[in-house]
Image (tube, rainbow, N blue to C red):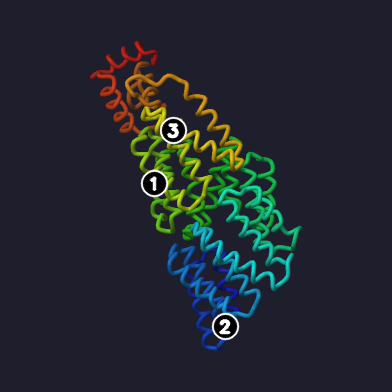
Amino acid sequence: MLCLAEAEANYFAGNLDLSLELGRRVTAIGERHGDRDLVGYGLHQQGRALAALGDIAAAVALLDEAMLAVLSGEVRSPLVSAGIYCSSINVCEAISDIARAQAWTSAFEQWACSHGAGTPISGSCRMHRSVILWLHGSWTEAEREARLACPEQNGTVAMDAGRAWYQVGEIRRVVGDLSGAEEAFAHAGRYGSEVQPGMALLRAAQGRSEAAAAGLARALAERPADRLARASLLPAMAELTTTAGEYARAQQVVAELDELADIGPAARARAAYARGALHLADDDPVAALPELRSAVRIWAELDIPYELARTRRLIGTACRAVGDEEAAAVEWAACRSIFARLGAGPDVEATDALLADRGLSPLPAGLTEREAEVLRLVSGGLTNHAIAQSLSLSDKTVARHLSNIFTKIGVSSRAAATAYAYRHDLA
């Protein structure tokens, strides 16, 4: 039917409001003619459009209604039933509602058994199972399931094949197999799957920051209204811009993440992490710590160990910045243990470097690393504006740093601060 095809096409084209309206029409037509397949499909179409628009509660309610129609046998078409299962699970995965995703995946697997093992439907089941295993930290099993979902194994439909290869790429990226990740992302792209944000994070790991930023910018530009898609892309953009010292752009990204935080707990955790990382980069570890601890609580509740470990590592860095070396060591040791258990080789190496660096003498007077850097530039005769340009900071931030430095070292002039720097080998 034309209305059904248009609803599908507009959804994938990003015309979400029109897709939602067409889904309502399909539902109404199905109800008018007593066609439960059409009713189920219309509910599923409305649900995934609403999810992309960010109305998660309404989306889940509609998808649950469609799922009940499948489970009760009202929906008879295998194609419609599989679509409803996949859309429901996709939304659960996107909002990190892992318990619901597991329940629907189990139901999907039981339903798929009646349609024969080794079919495209069983491939979809494997892909969803892989995502759950990945989130919970069982990466070896997750990659195995994703590889079994790839098309040469069972004829998986192109969309699911692309997602399966993307999943393989993400796992290979975090374990440090960068060439394997690149190969997997290339396969995903050939099947029409979006390869961001994974490809951008891969490019960043390869030192190709411009390519990373360009890929993310392109993906975001293609999805101006899709809140779920943007919520998955923006954390990587926040990380890239913060690392590059592009603080004005990073603040814009973090502000949008804050607006998307109502999607669910994972979105709140990502927003809090991004805010904390930005505060830390701007040399405000005191402001960073509560944000990062909020993110840790959410990741612990969701049982997503990799994100938990990444956040604890940043908490350790913030603790060091405020002079609490013991707390920093505790956080780094804890996150290293998690990274090692997961098999996240690059993260283990990065954390080992932090632990090895712990033997350095702390800076005098409780100065942070950034404050010591500002003091060194002051002792070199630079003005506040020149320091701001050198460190990619605002003049206001440099003035705040200088005020904190004067207070900590007990001076009231740049000349006295310069003398202090020379006495303590900070010049």
Give the mark nearer the N terminus: 1 vs 3: 1
The secondary element bearing badge 1 is classed as helix
Residue 82, position in %: x, y? 63, 71
Amino acid type of the residue that numbered disc 2 sits on in the rendered structure: Arg
Query: Around disc 3, counting alpha carbons within 10 Å, would you say few (fewer than 14), some (14 to 19), or many (20 or more)?
Result: many
| Foreground residue among 353 and 274 | 353
Q: Quadrant of the C terminus?
A: top left
Amino acid type of the residue that numbered disc 3 sits on in the rendered structure: Thr
Image point (56%, 52%), residue name: 135
Give the mark nearer the N terminus: 2 vs 1: 2
How far is mark 2 from mark 1, CA to CA?
A: 45 Å
| Residue 37 visible, this angle | no
Please give the label number shown on residue 366.
none
Residue 426, position in %: x, y? 39, 16
Name the residue that disc number 2 marks: 36
Residue 350, position in %: x, y? 55, 32
Between marks 2 and 1 in the image, the one whose residue lies nearer the viewer = 1
Image point (40%, 34%), residue name: 318
Give the mark nearer the N terminus: 2 vs 3: 2
| Foreground residue among 328 and 178 | 328
| Foreground residue among 167 and 418 | 167
Name the residue that disc number 1 marks: 294
The secondary element bearing badge 2 is classed as helix
Q: Quadrant of the N terminus?
A: bottom right
Amino acid type of the residue that numbered disc 1 sits on in the rendered structure: Ser
